[in-house]
Amino acid sequence: MTPYRVAVVGSGPAGVYATEALIRSGVDVSVDIYDRLPTPYGLVRYGVAPDHPRIKSIIVALRKVLERDQVRFLGDVHVGVDVTTEQLGQLYDAVVFATGASVGRRLSIPGEDLAGVCSATDFVAWYSGHPDHARAGESFPLQAESVVVIGAGNVALDVARLLVKSAEDLAGTDMPPHVLDRLARSGVRDVHLVCRRGPEHAKFTAKELRELLELDDVTTEIDADLLPAGSEDPLTAANLKAFADLAARESAPGRRTLHFHFWSRPVELLDAGGAVAAVRLEKTQDVGGTVVATGELTELKAGMVVRSVGYYSMQIGTLPFDEDLGRVPHDAGRVLYPDGRALDGHYVAGWVKRGPSGVVGTNRACAADTVVSILADLEGRPPRGAGPEEVDKVLAEHGIRPVTYDGWLSIDSEELSRGQGLGRARTKIPDWETLRRVAAADAEQPGRDTA
């Protein structure tokens, strides 16, 4: 019997978990996983901090799914540009969009477009070796003595931690050499982490906070008077204990200092010749569970500002999209038109479905729920999807020769080899040209038409 043919767009955790749920369903199905990049794994590869290799170990499980006989990886294919969403819908019995949320939200305050202001999304992508950001380091004013990071989640904390860490501490990571070199020459001495609410509301994890205790040459400054005595919520209690330990730690003045600013919100970024020079903050307070501005203003010197206040997704081709929510409207994973009708055969999973919430594992349940809808819709329908040869023919007609899984393995092998040469596990290839060239070196990988 001919299997059902499903396309999954996005090879991060949500896309791979959806694939896993499909092939474990007992239904005869084969899956083509598309990704805009020549490399799989999405934010696990390009969003998890380089100094957190244990979190990256989830790649081992994701890799097992990609290596299943029913699965093909088709990298370096930009769905919505190289091939339309309508064309995919015609080629497959079902299409699952799991493209994540890759754009950082704005602060919407004066001065946000000054030089020296960037999103955490862009900064993280740069130090993680994302090929879209190979030269972005030139725009980050790391010669600044004072940097302000705005946000109260783990991404903001990742950025702050990597800014205060020494180059020696980062030398064993998979960061590209040009990133390590740029960070080694950093002039940053003070990093200010600004949080709109109090420490009891911060979305950091205690594990990440406690990592700061291990940085002997970094001083942390926290106003202990702002720390509540405790909390009935165990996660909040663990955070508050970590904050208390950081506040109580006795240490000599460090090479760099990380300052926590709670109950503060940015209201303006101040200009000095077209570049950011300071952040104007307004003190806030909790009134009946609502954050209220007090009118009390202060200023923080800042030669660089990194905003980390959330993410939203980008529209995929002509797929319905809710601009206000920054995600695709859906019902149980089924893509919906504005009038509430379902777009037959089109589904979403992960952050493009529910918004940027949860941890990596949250995507497993999210993807599984979407797969339930897919299987219910396919039940009783004969397979109609095009076979792999026909799909390849359509892509070739568009000048697209995808990076196959073997092509990715060539990239993987080259990165491991580069890392070995530098005494570490891996060194990422950070640019499109080299990624494509290395992938094309595989005997069965002719490379992409670039004319």
Image (cartoon, helix red, strand yellow):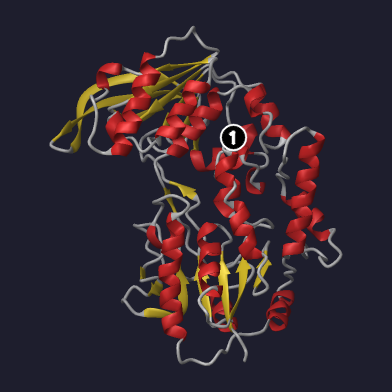
Q: Residue furthest left?
A: 288
Element carrying mark 1: loop
Which of 88/23 is in front? Answer: 23
- Number of labels in the image equals 1
Could you tell me residue 48's position as x and y percent? Answer: 55, 43
Q: Residue furthest top?
A: 252
Residue occupying image coordinates x 56% and y 89%: 383
Residue 195, can we see it?
no
In the picture, measured across the screen, residue 15 lies left or right of residue 107, that is: right
Above or below, comparing residue 90 to residue 268 in the picture: below
In the picture, measured across the screen, residue 398 lies left or right of residue 103, that is: right
Could you tell me residue 319's position as x and y percent? Answer: 46, 70
Above or below, comparing residue 355 to residue 430 in the picture: below
Above or below, comparing residue 196 to residue 39 in the picture: above
Could you tell me residue 417's position as x and y percent? Answer: 81, 43
Residue 99, can we see it?
yes
Is disc 1 surrounded by few (<14), some (14 to 19) or many (20+) residues within 10 Å?
some
Residue occupying image coordinates x 71% and y 43%: 428
For badge 1, the amino acid type reads: Asp
Could you tell me residue 93's position as x and y percent? Answer: 54, 83
The C terminus: image quadrant: bottom right
Which of 20/33 is in front? Answer: 20
Q: Quadrant of residue 42?
A: bottom right
Residue occupying image coordinates x 65% and y 69%: 68
The N terminus: image quadrant: bottom right
In the picture, measured across the screen, residue 343 lies left or right of residue 267, that is: right
Can you identify the residue that label 1 sits on?
A: 51
